[in-house]
Amino acid sequence: MRDEKILVIDDDINILEVIRMRLKAWGYFVTIARDGNEAKAALSSTPFNLVIIDLRLSEENGIELMEKIIRFYPNIPVIILTAHGSIESAVEAMRKGAYSYITKPFNNEDLLLHIKNALEKHYMAREIEHLRSQLDERNDFKHIIGKDKRMQEILEQVVRIANTDCIVSLYGESGTGKELIARAIHHNSNRPKGPFVTVHCDTVPEEILEAELFGYVRGNKGFHEKKEGLFIQAKGGTIFLDEIGAASLSLQARLLKVLQEGVIKPDGGAKGMKTDVRIIVASTTDLQKAVNDETFRKDLFYKIHVVPIYIPPLRERRDDIPLLATYFLTGFCKVLRKDIVGFTPAAIQRMILYDWPGNVRELQNKIEHAAIITNKNVVATEDVFADTNVLKNTFNSYKDAKERFEREYIENLLKISKGNVSAASKMAKRYRADIYKLIKKYNINPDYYKDGLTATPKE
């Protein structure tokens, strides 16, 4: 059931009536305005989800009116209507923040596709608050933002395993949020008041790491004082072994013994101590491959691989990018005491297109930088991507740009058709075989769109 409200601004009453009839037939609520004053009055009284503006208004400039709307209502996407001869101006409007443009005369399918895609962007802002309340209900997962199906499944898995003491293995690229997931497990476990101790196995020399983990007695290896190991310091809580794949074979053997016996023996000590700690490990490397390469012990792998959780990189859950960006911006604005209301549609679009090799950590850093340097109440593309090389890298070769367009086009078709390939081929005016070929090429599963879900690669 649709309840989206759309404002259409055009000085041609005939165009207004045609668009109004079409949109009403599709189930949208429509308000029309013939100039900027009528548009201003409508915007002040009604919370619109989308604005459609004619580029050429007789009394004023459509782009200037669009800029005013974006300035005061940055979360409302704007679609520009333009004649064939005004495409350059329409492109300029997109650079200034318009979501997209449609050339006149337009057909019903094209208009509907643009509207549906633009409304999806608007839902991102509304989803923030809804998702936060959901996460708050889900045991205080405030810092894990994501509407991607896989992230929701991860949260559900965390809820199920948190109150057990089973070993959890987190896998994912650097910056995907493995430590956040580990902390969420700890805070929602039966030992939340205990310490959460993080150990970076890839940054500490082997001998020092073993001494830190297991402790040592006075006089051992020249140490003048006795030291409790981190396993003992984490008593009653959780120890998080990050990058466990970097641990030496010697350390792996000692870890295996701890897991098997539940006893810690400090370096140089004769007596072991019972452990009371939950263990969570993480790795950016494929531990199964490391086992095959004989750089990681097979017995240790099976001991820690009890509950594996795979965290997807940010580029595989692009719908989460606006959510995360807005979440980070809100936090930084509080710290900086700045009143920034959001991002321009162009900035959102560019962030979605960028591949984020540093994942969520890189996004957080860029949003912090943008919040610091911007002197406006809306974050623009150049604020987020201050490095022009990054902007250039957003669009690589012609081949990459074409493939990205093809994939997004097919995904949009499947979203609108709810996974019906026959309907998608009719909308695209292509043979079904052509659509199936692209679906296979980009490893897209139409079934994921039948319930309005985001695409997930087929296994």
Image (spheres, grey):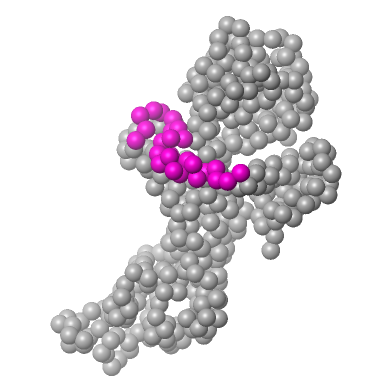
Look at the image and tell me whether residue 303 can be seen.
no
In depth, the one of 457 and 162 nearer the eye is 457
Residue 29, position in %: x, y?
A: 69, 23
In this view, 249 is above or below 150: below
**Relative vertical location of residue 267 with respect to residue 316 in this rendering, above or below:** below
- 147 relative to 459 in the view: left or right: left
Residue 2 belongs to magenta span: no
On the image, the x and y values in percent for residue 268 come to: 25, 90
Q: Farthest residue toward the front? A: 398
The residue depicted at 73 percent of the width and 41 percent of the height is 413
Image vertical order of residue 269 relative to residue 201, above or below: below
Q: Quadrant of the N terminus?
A: top right
Question: Quick one: quadrant of the C terminus?
Answer: bottom right
Seen at 69% across and 10% down, the residue is 12
Q: Does 208 sit above or below residue 79?
A: below
Q: Nearer the viewer, residue 121 or 380?
A: 380
Residue 121 appears in which quarter of the rendering?
A: top right
Residue beneath the point at 23% across and 79% down: 227
Query: Horizontal and vertical percent for residue 358?
Result: 45, 54
Residues shaded magenta: 373-398
Residue 191 in sight in this render: yes
Tag count in the figure? 0
Could you say which quadrant of the image residue 457 lies in?
bottom right
Verify whether residue 397 appears in magenta. yes
Position of 426 with respect to 152 (left or right) is right
**Taking 211 as reference, is 201 left or right?**
right
Q: Measuring 48% from the left and 23% from the top, which residue is drawn there?
A: 72
